[in-house]
Image (tube, helix red, strand yellow):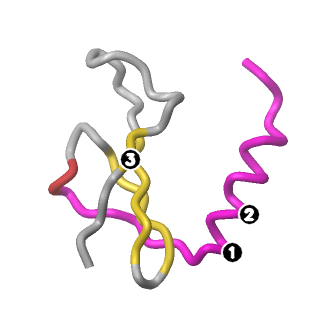
Amino acid sequence: MTVQWRKSSYSGSANDDVCVELGRLADGVGVRDSKDPDAGHLVLTVAEFARLVDRFKRLPAR
């Protein structure tokens, strides 16, 4: 399976030091640092990823 990584729309410009990419994997969702894509990635189940997104949505706005 070829993973197509997608950069978060919340990631900023090329000088932004917080860039995240997501990819749909056979066993869930991959999360990696777009600045260092060869460093590996975190694998979350779809349910774990949904809970993570829900927690982020509930954080106070900055």
Residue furthest left in the image: 38
x%, y% of residue 39? 20, 57
Mark 3 or mark 1, which is nearer the start of the sequence?
Answer: 3
* Residue plotted at (29% across, 42% down): 34
Mark 3 or mark 2, which is nearer the start of the sequence?
Answer: 3
What residue is disc 2 on?
A: 51
Q: Is residue 58 magenta?
A: yes
Picture layout, residue 13 above or below residue 17: above
Tell me which amino acid carries mark 2.
Arg
Specify the quadrant of the image occupied by residue 41.
bottom left
Q: Nearer the viewer, residue 11 or 1?
A: 1
Residue furthest bottom in the image: 27
Q: Secondary structure at mark 3?
A: strand
The part of the chain drawn in magenta is: 39-62
Tell me which amino acid carries mark 3.
Arg
Spatial CA distance of label 2 from label 1 is 6 Å
* Residue plotted at (27% across, 19% down): 14
What residue is disc 3 on?
A: 6
What residue is disc 1 on?
A: 47
Tell me which amino acid carries mark 1.
Ala
